[in-house]
Image (cartoon, helix red, strand yellow):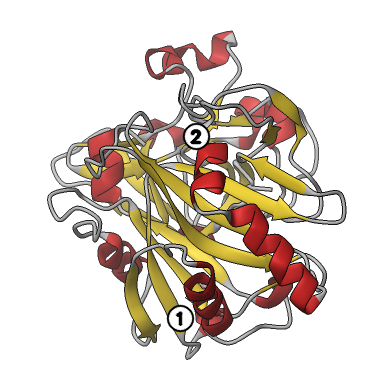
Amino acid sequence: MRKLATIRKVDEIRPIEDADTIELALFGGWQVVVKKAQEIKPGMLVVYCEIDSVFPELRQYEFLRQDKFRLRTKKFRGALSQGIVFNVDEVLTVGNYAEGEDVSGFMGILLYEPPIPAAISGEVVGAYPGSAPKTDEERVQNLAIETFSGMPFFVSEKLDGTSCSVIFDEVGLHVCGRNWEFCETPDQTFWKLVRRYDIEAKLRNYHARTGCYLALQGEVVGYGIQSNLYGLKGQDIFIFNIFDITRQRFLPVAAYRALLDDFGLKGVPVVAENFHKAGFDHARFLEYAQGKSLLNPHAEREGVVFRSIDETRSNQGKLSFKVISNKYLLKHGG
């Protein structure tokens, strides 16, 4: 689960040029514009709320109404700001709070979920099945990047669409969005793609051949989805993960790519086959995320996803994280 509001220690305070009343507070890879009157100092514990936090409609958060109570990436006096910072006693009751503690629930903060596009909506079977993990990646700003120094990564483009998981387990076939499983109807986009690519038969044949159940996870993009950044006429799916349900492990990169070829499915566009992060800090990663989309060279890409090439012992076989382009966020209001 993403920690939207956490107790954080301020790493650094930086001045903003030609700004008398505001300054920058830094937390790991994040930076936030704060008021000097808050007297935020390096080393002190504060409440930091990330972008995509949605606040309850309470009087103390009324200043967020113009953004529908959602935190977005913004600029103040030319300085990038992602999130908001409170002194602990401004928003929490008296108590002892530890660094890193998730206080989202105490504050009533929820994660922003984009509205389901009309082409995707339909009759819901139930909640997302528990046999495969939900699609989500940690942001690089929340990671101590020195912990994976020297590890080789496979880098793919993060596409701006809506996530879809096609899960074949002991119960049968499930076609899902991020949180819900959908019934098959003639107009439901996920199901149309499953039938177009004959995915059910491919998953059944794979199970018959290997004894393993699989989940395919991908991004659906195209007409009627988000802003159709790529200018596609129809809709398509690009697979970014294959999860072995039987072994409860993600397939390693080489096996993932080989199986996509075997199934005749498209993977997400490849940015780098073998990336080593030597010399990269958070700022360099964020700079690397910027660029043009490989699906449409006229469109700014949303960002990139890093995935360990070699199988890991933890995280169900892989280490992965996403880096969202700040240029994209500023343009598209994220």
Type of amino acid at the residue the image marks with label 1 = Phe
The one nearer the camera, 267 or 93, is 267
208 on left or right of 145:
right
Displayed quadrant of residue 137: bottom right
The answer to whether any part of residue 140 appears in the image is: no
Label 1 crowd (10 A; few <14 / some 14-19 / many >=20): many
Quarter occupied by the C terminus: top left
Task: Identify residue for label 2.
Answer: 189
Task: Give me the residue at 25% from left, 56% from top.
Answer: 295
Q: Position of residue 150 (x, y in %)?
A: 47, 91
Task: Give me the residue at 47% from left, 74% from top.
Answer: 261
Task: Give me the residue at 51% from left, 73% from top.
Answer: 307
Task: Give me the residue at 23% from left, 56% from top.
Answer: 293
Task: Identify residue for label 1.
Answer: 153
- Relative vertical location of residue 301 with respect to residue 157 in this rendering, above or below: above
41 on left or right of 275:
right
Q: Position of residue 50 (x, y in %)?
A: 50, 41
Q: Position of residue 136 (x, y in %)?
A: 59, 52
The one nearer the camera, 43 or 303, is 303
State which tag comes first along the sequence, 1 or 2: 1
